[in-house]
């Protein structure tokens, strides 16, 4: 039955499901962020690891968490169903944080293994359910993933703050106990979606309307293209934690005058600024998105602009390096401008990229397509680690120029194949 609502809006009966799913994601990110920033310190203090070993374990753990989305997506599509897969993943994550809360050395590795399994089941299924909760409308799906991304970022920021406070005030057991409770709340909220989920949202044919196998193949080709170039996005998204963090510490002026007061700035402040920019931009972007349907802007073109914005951010940093950042310190305005462009690019590439992936995925491969998107993150993170080896070998302007060039190459690749994504 045709809806009387605008094509880009989300019907009321679906909005309750969308709100619950966003809350589920926010709680899951809260739990993960409570642990992640302090993981290396925990591994040193409670597991007796050296800093390099702890960093290696963290890198492998994160890579497996993303790569496991591929088998997890296959299980969701072919065996479990996305609803069962997501609920089971939330339950397994709760057990993982609970095992860490026991604070016993013998449970450390089983807890990490459970967390990898939990993420493999949770991530693909949840994103497919988010797409189903918004229906088949392109604009509604975009708005749904934008709200989801806002919830994830808010949950992550609050979780990081909670982790610092809980560890400082009560110790490791309290930190992981809080993470377990947040994960348990996530699982409980997810169970609540069964009471409000529209019947057609649970139908495995709800995503996509491509009955023909040839059309399905064409759509999967578009998914592969999006995920392949997304490797560049994940590569550049790691720079705030790698090259830009070092540039902030070693090549950026550490003081800023604001309202006649001098403030000290460090790498952590710039990293926090990046997260705050994303959170601040998302509501504005949502409001602008609500008006965009009148102008007929194609969603398929937005990722192209995301990569252009990324290229501009690193071209800006190359200019900063040539202006003195290669060997000395430059104004913090350079780094702030870079983070502003990267924040805009992240909004254009992360939630809207996922929206496109679920839009083009054949209905029987939706969870696997989401798993492929997360697998591209693992590859991008690995390339970021390899690229970081060149930081001390190249002048900074060449390092940043290389990132700008690969971002432009990603934009060009999408430009050449933009007709399937229009």
Image: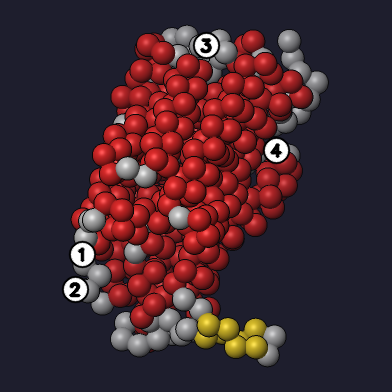
Q: Determine the CA span between mark 2 and mark 3.
A: 52 Å
Q: Determine the CA span between mark 4 and mark 3.
A: 26 Å
Q: Say which residue appears at 31% left-offset and 58% top-offset.
A: 45
> Going from the N terminus, do you reach mark 2 or mark 3 first?
3
Residue 382 location (% of width, % of height):
26, 50
Tell me, for residue 293, which label it has, or none.
4
Secondary element under disc 3, as helix, strand or loop, is: loop
Residue 353 location (% of width, % of height):
48, 39
Between residues 317 and 388, which one lies in front from this camera angle? 388
Q: Determine the CA span between mark 4 and mark 2.
A: 48 Å
Residue 71 location (% of width, % of height):
31, 24
Q: Determine the CA span between mark 1 and mark 2.
A: 8 Å
Q: Say which residue appears at 33% left-offset and 36% top-offset.
A: 111
Secondary element under disc 4, as helix, strand or loop, is: loop
The residue pinned by badge 2 equals: 393
Tell me, for residue 389, which label it has, or none.
1
Residue 227 location (% of width, % of height):
37, 37
Contact between labelled residues 2 and 4, with CB atoms less than 8 Å apart? no
Tell me, for residue 220, which label it has, or none.
none
Q: Is residue 107 left or right of residue 262?
A: left
In the rendered image of this protein, does residue 422 appear above or below residue 41?
A: above
Could you say which quadrant of the image residue 252 lies in? bottom left
Could you say which quadrant of the image residue 17 lies in? top right
């Amino acid at each position: 039955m045709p809806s009387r609502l605008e094509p880009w809006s989300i019907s009321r009966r679906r909005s309750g499901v969308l709100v619950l799913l966003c809350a589920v994601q926010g709680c899951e990110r809260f739990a993960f962020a409570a642990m992640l920033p302090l993981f290396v310190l925990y591994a040193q203090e409670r597991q007796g690891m050296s800093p390099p070993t702890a960093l290696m374990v963290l890198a492998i753990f994160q890579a497996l968490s993303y790569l496991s989305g591929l088998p997890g997506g296959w299980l969701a599509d072919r065996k479990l169903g996305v609803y069962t897969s997501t609920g089971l993943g939330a339950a397994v994550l709760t057990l993982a944080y609970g095992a860490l809360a026991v604070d016993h050395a013998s449970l450390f590795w089983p807890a990490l293994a459970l967390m990898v399994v939990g993420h493999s089941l949770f991530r693909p299924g949840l994103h497919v359910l988010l797409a189903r909760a918004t229906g088949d409308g392109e604009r509604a799906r975009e708005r749904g993933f934008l709200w989801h991304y806002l919830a994830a970022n808010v949950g992550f920021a609050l979780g990081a703050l909670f982790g610092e406070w809980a560890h400082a005030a009560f110790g490791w057991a309290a930190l992981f106990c809080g993470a377990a409770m947040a994960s348990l709340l996530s699982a409980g909220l997810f169970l609540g979606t069964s009471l409000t989920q529209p019947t057609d949202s649970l139908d495995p044919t709800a995503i996509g309307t491509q009955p023909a196998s040839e059309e399905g193949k064409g759509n999967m080709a578009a998914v592969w293209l999006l995920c392949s170039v997304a490797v560049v996005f994940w590569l550049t998204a790691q720079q705030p934690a790698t090259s830009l963090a070092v540039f902030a510490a070693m090549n950026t002026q550490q003081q800023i005058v604001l309202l006649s007061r001098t403030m000290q700035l460090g790498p952590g402040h710039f990293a926090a600024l990046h997260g705050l920019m994303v959170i601040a931009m998302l509501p504005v972007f949502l409001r602008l998105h609500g008006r965009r349907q009148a102008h007929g802007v194609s969603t398929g073109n937005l990722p192209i602009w995301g990569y252009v914005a990324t290229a501009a951010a690193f071209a800006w940093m190359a200019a900063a390096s040539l202006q003195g950042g290669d060997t000395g310190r430059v104004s913090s305005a350079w780094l702030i401008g870079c983070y502003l462009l990267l924040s805009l690019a992240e909004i254009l590439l992360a939630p809207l990229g996922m929206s496109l992936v679920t839009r083009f995925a054949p209905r029987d491969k939706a969870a696997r397509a989401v798993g492929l998107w997360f697998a591209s993150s693992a590859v991008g993170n690995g390339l970021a680690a390899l690229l970081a080896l060149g930081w001390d070998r190249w002048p900074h302007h060449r390092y940043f120029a290389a990132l700008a060039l690969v971002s432009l190459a990603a934009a060009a690749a999408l430009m050449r194949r933009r007709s399937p994504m229009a």
